[in-house]
Image (cartoon, helix red, strand yellow):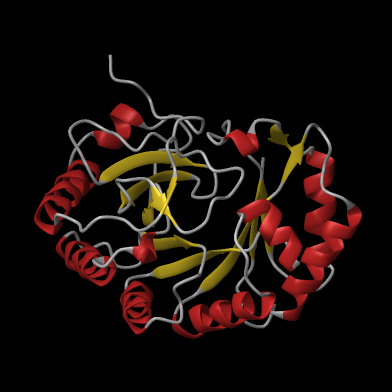
Amino acid sequence: MEKILTIADHSRYFKNCTYIYPVVSRRSNGISLGINLNLNNACNWRCVYCQVDGLIRGKPNPIDLVKLEFELDQMLDWIINGTFIQQFAPIGLRRFNDICLAGNGEPTLSVDFVAVCEIIAKLRLKYQLAGQVKTILITNGSEMHKLKVQSGLRLIAENNGEVWFKIDRGTQLGVQNVNQVSLSLSSVVQHLKTSASLCFTQVQSCWFAIGKIEPSLVEVEEFVSLVASIKSDISGVLLYSTARNPALAEGATISQVSELFMLNLKAKLESHGIKVKSYL
């Protein structure tokens, strides 16, 4: 019997695929077909809640574009024309929501990012996906100032695309503690504005308890203030908490926040006229 996909299992390995992996996603409310451009587990951030085993600092290796296109083509054919959804998707989530550039590190670090976006566009046309299925980029936004990345975003935008732009905290210290990078909030805001000028963009934000202690009211207010300052640039906010155990030593004591915490954070954002979806 084939294993049914679950929200708790976001394995990057499916059948004989190297780059393509299907998952059931809470935020997608259905099947998300992931594309992993970071096979070496390399990223320029080190978020404490990261679930990638063996995460390293660095950039991904070049992509075998022929293999990636073959795998994506085969998986799309199985999903669109075959029995994949009936075989692997749980009842209630039997819908194909998106093709998602995510994986084991920051996808825009790949030198082949634009070429992969072109492959997605080509195969979306082949399978006549049009407005039925989204193209999603999950990103920390760090490469948005680069022209090649901007070219990729334009392609994503042309293919029913949206960007899920990571902002986990509202201060430089908060970003340092959660994402383990040193950068100014002004650069975060500028990169988000660049993204939003090219493609439909939402803020994606992860909230969690450390040692069973939830984030302070001050942390929440700082985040709400930052997001309120950019609300005209974004389409909304996706709030979520950790559904699976982090892989890093820094995340050993991380756990989900309470439903009450998430509801309160959601309400504070909504009081500024911001559209919010939250997931536990």
Identified at 37% across, 24% down, the residue is 4
Q: Is 242 located above or below residue 111 in the figure?
A: above
x and y percent of residue 116 in the render?
A: 23, 64
Seen from the viewer's position, the closer of residues 247 and 129 is 247
Which quarter of the figure has residue 170? bottom right
x and y percent of residue 248 in the render?
A: 55, 36
In the image, taking residue 210 as reference, residue 102 lies left or right, namely left
Q: Is residue 125 visible?
A: yes
Identified at 78% across, 56% down, the residue is 266
Seen from the viewer's position, the closer of residues 13 and 142 is 142
Q: Is 17 located above or below residue 196 in the figure?
A: above
Which of the image's four quarters has the N terminus? top left
Which of the image's four quarters has the C terminus? top right
Identified at 66% across, 43% down, the residue is 241
Count the marks: 0
Identified at 66% across, 75% down, the residue is 184
x and y percent of residue 263 in the render?
A: 81, 49
In the image, taking residue 193 as reference, residue 186 lies left or right, namely right
Q: Is residue 273 visible?
A: no
x and y percent of residue 26 in the render?
A: 54, 43
Residue situated furthest top in the rendering: 1
Seen from the viewer's position, the closer of residues 259 and 230 is 230
Which quarter of the figure has residue 16? top left
Q: Is 81 located above or below residue 58 in the figure?
A: above
In the image, taking residue 203 as reference, residue 62 lies left or right, namely left
